[in-house]
Amino acid sequence: MKNDLLQRLVKARAEKRPVALVTDLGSGLQTLVHDDVDHGGFGLDDDAKAEVRRFLREDRSGIVEVGDSQLFIHSFNPPLRIIIVGAVHIAQALAPIASLAGYDVVVVDPRRAFATDDRFPGITMNGEWPDDALKELNIDSRTAVVTLTHDPKLDDPALHVALRSKAFYVGSLGSRKTHGKRVDRLREDGFTESEIGRIHAPVGLSIGAVSPAEIALSIMAQITHVLHRDPPDKAAAA
Amino acid sequence: MTYQNDIVEQAAALKAAGKRVALATVVSTWGSSPRPIGSQLVVDDTGAMQGSVSGGCIEGAVVHEAMKVMEDGEPRLLSFGVTDDQAWEVGLACGGKVQVYVEAVE
């Protein structure tokens, strides 16, 4: 790979732009395909470009035969994202676990005592009220939302936005009793059963988790399960 | 070394640090190969590696080939699997097949 092509790939990833690197496995020639413009060592015809963009949309990589050539399409989509509402003890474990799993992490909490950089080193913090924060963060089908405050003042505004978004996963911390009250409030606020039914609660897979780190692990396991059971890009592309 | 997801960024950083660098990428798989298409390994001229193209079964052989690619600049398409002669030496213990494209960053 030419170093300048690698630099352009790194730049596109830093800008969170979807990009595919296409390699002719016979000649070694390579080109980058963005949604709109392309640069690189050889030209692809329109059909090939359409195929590359389809792979990108479906978040797939693989070899396609074009004429006599074997082209390897390597899709680089921006990372999946997790929005954690509540800069609580569980969030301190969930943020690094999600980061390890390759997610971009944002922790939302307007309470300054919780949302400190000391408690969340290297994590993006958002101090807005959760509904404003979530609207601003523009939730797409590659985003998971987890509420951890179990305080209706903070969790409910977040759920109001998340339940009508394209988020591939919505989870809320709280016992069955807490969740029952939450469901009642959401009904009163006009949410439908199918919207309310999107909430994973009690949050996380049932693995007997007790400590904050164990609960974080059970949440990340559940997000992973939902992600691979119903891949967001395939659902969106269908 | 910490766990890395960002192999192309690692490759760019190693290159910027003046090292010779090769990238290995899984381009096709059959059966139960442990890492999906698109998985990458970056190797520098000291043989140090980050990332993976299998569950540790073929990385040694890939690093060996990567050193040759850094020498002569010629990309190589490697095949590993139970039906290959190589399989007996460095094949996938789990019985899958995998093709790995190895290229130098120039």
Image (cartoon, helix red, strand yellow):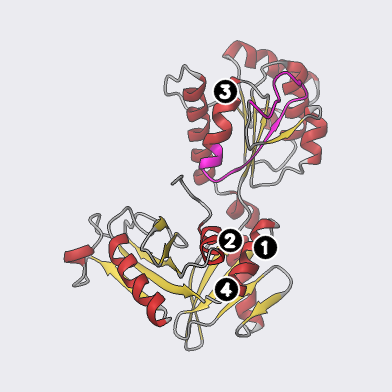
The picture quadrant where one finds residue A113 is: top right
The residue wearing badge 4 is A3
**Residues behind callouts 3 and 1 on a single chain:** yes
- Per the rendering, the mark at residue A23 is none
Nearest the eye: A105 or A220: A105
Indicate whether residue B57 is drawn in magenta.
Answer: no
Give the amino acid type for the residue marked by disc 3 in the picture.
Answer: Ile
**Residues behind callouts 3 and 4 on a single chain:** yes
N-terminal of the pair, mark 3 or mark 2, is 2
Prevailing secondary structure class for the magenta stretch in the rendered image:
loop
Indicate whether residue A107 is drawn in magenta.
Answer: yes
Circles 1 and 4: CB distance less than 8 Å? Answer: no
Circles 1 and 2: CB distance less than 8 Å? Answer: yes
**To which chain does the residue with label 3 belong?**
A
The residue wearing badge 2 is A76
Circles 2 and 4: CB distance less than 8 Å? Answer: no
Residue at 68 percent across and 24 percent down: it is A86
Identify whether A40 is placed above or below A194: below
Gap in angstroms between the C-alphas marked 1 and 4: 14 Å
**To which chain does the residue with label 2 belong?**
A
Q: Nearer the viewer, mark 1 or mark 2?
A: 1
N-terminal of the pair, mark 1 or mark 2, is 1
The residue wearing badge 1 is A12
